[in-house]
Amino acid sequence: MTIAATEEATSAADQEFRHLLEQGEERLSAGDAEGARDSLRKAAERLPRDVAALGLFGQACYRAGLYEEAAEAYGKLVDENPAEVSGRVNLGLAWLKGGRRPEAVRQFSIALDLDPEHRKSMGYLGLALLESGDPSAARPWLEKSGSAPLLARCDALLADRAAAAPEVTRPSPTPMPTSAPLRTPVAPGGLGAFAAGCTVRPPPEVFAVDEGILHVAVRGELVCRIDGLFAVRGAVTAHPEVKRFRGKVTEKPFGAGRDRMNRMAGEGALFFRTGGWVFTVVDLAGDTGYFREGAVFAFEEAVIFENGRVPSRHSRDLDLVHLRGRGRMLLRTAGAPVAIEVSGTESLRVPPSALVGWTGAVTPRIGLLGAVDGVAATAPSPGSPVMVELTGDGRVFVDPDAAQAD
């Protein structure tokens, strides 16, 4: 084919695309969603990455009640421009109308991460949470959005729940006899008294530790490890999570074995033994941080994550997780974490196992204790400890009780 013939064919294809796009837009304006969908689908097939065609095709599918197709189109728009708020909102609405509430909550939450003052996203997030059966979480967003009808509906639901909730009291456990000659204590009073004395009742929080038991509430979706899991209550499913690099989903597993991250979905509760670990709940509240992968045990669906790595010539690479958004995360450490400030040119060095994470403009690299800023005054001995050196301005979270040797 000659260059002239190629240009002629390209021009004809462009004209056909524009004709289909205009035809679809006209039909959509006339209220013919099905007819518009057919024309716009053909236009999108000709130029799959055209923003106008994808947006109009998603709109036609949405009006036709084909919410899965609308979500697919809006999802492609989000892939093309992940920082565009309107695409996130449209995708969230398609998921919400299609009954996929956890996905809708996620998209509206991301939209608010991109634009914290986007009032429509506030209202839609509140509605999605309300329809997910969580009016307590929905209320602040509905109040911020200024949606009086939805706020009144939410308050009425909260009032109904409060009025219908029975008063629950936990029976005191039957005391064990201290003077019995038996080596094994005996719990009198039958199985009912025994059960009452050791019943585990999860608190209302998403993450909570009580008497050596970690409780994780599943209300929609969250990402969590399964190490130490000994019971699951309710309709909860688990799917192995994979890593994400630079906004792209990979096939690499996020963790390994029982320590692998899983995406938990449904309604119920997970029960873990703490196994001597210290668990710390952190509310990100829109902030961002980098954490050592092994220190992150779980995080809510609203939290956006991306995996990273600090390369090392002296030991294995340091795997990291970048977390941001409005949601809670759960840290797992040997002891209670402490924060140490770094600023200017003064660096902070910690063993890899003691590093929990950091927030702020901090740059990490891995070296030996015998070197400063990557340069040794004298050659470090082969047995010099491996350290993570952190420079910049921010706060570094450290686990002083980390026992694992590097």
Image: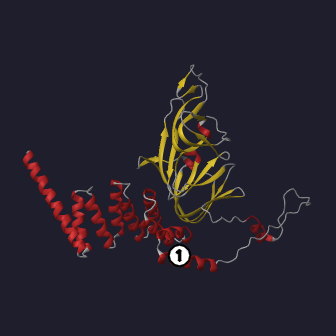
Task: Point out the residue furthest to the top here.
Answer: 378
Percent from the top left, x then y, of residue 377?
56, 20
164 to the left or right of 139: right
Task: Point out the residue furthest to the front here.
Answer: 344
Amino acid of disc 1 = Cys
Name the colour scheme. secondary structure
380 to the left or right of 125: right
Q: Residue at x 49, y 72 (%)?
A: 131
Percent from the top left, x then y, of residue 100?
44, 67
Quadrant of res 171: bottom right
Q: Residue at x 53, y 68 (%)?
A: 140
Could you tell me which quadrant the C terminus lies in? top right
In the image, 324 versus 257, the foreground residue is: 324
- Vertical order, 121 against 363 (above or below): below
How many numbered marks does the figure carry? Answer: 1
| Badge 1: residue crowd in 10 Å (few <14, some 14–19, many ≥20) | many
- Vertical order, 325 against 163 (above or below): above
- Vertical order, 369 against 317 (above or below): above
Q: Residue at x 56, y 20 (%)?
A: 379
Q: What secondary structure is found at the residue carrying circle 1?
A: helix
Quadrant of res 47: bottom left
286 to the left or right of 333: left
Residue underneath mark 1: 154
In the image, 262 versus 170, the foreground residue is: 170
Visible in this render: residue 1? no
Visible in this render: residue 385? yes
Percent from the top left, x then y, of residue 174?
82, 67
Percent from the top left, x then y, of residue 214?
65, 57
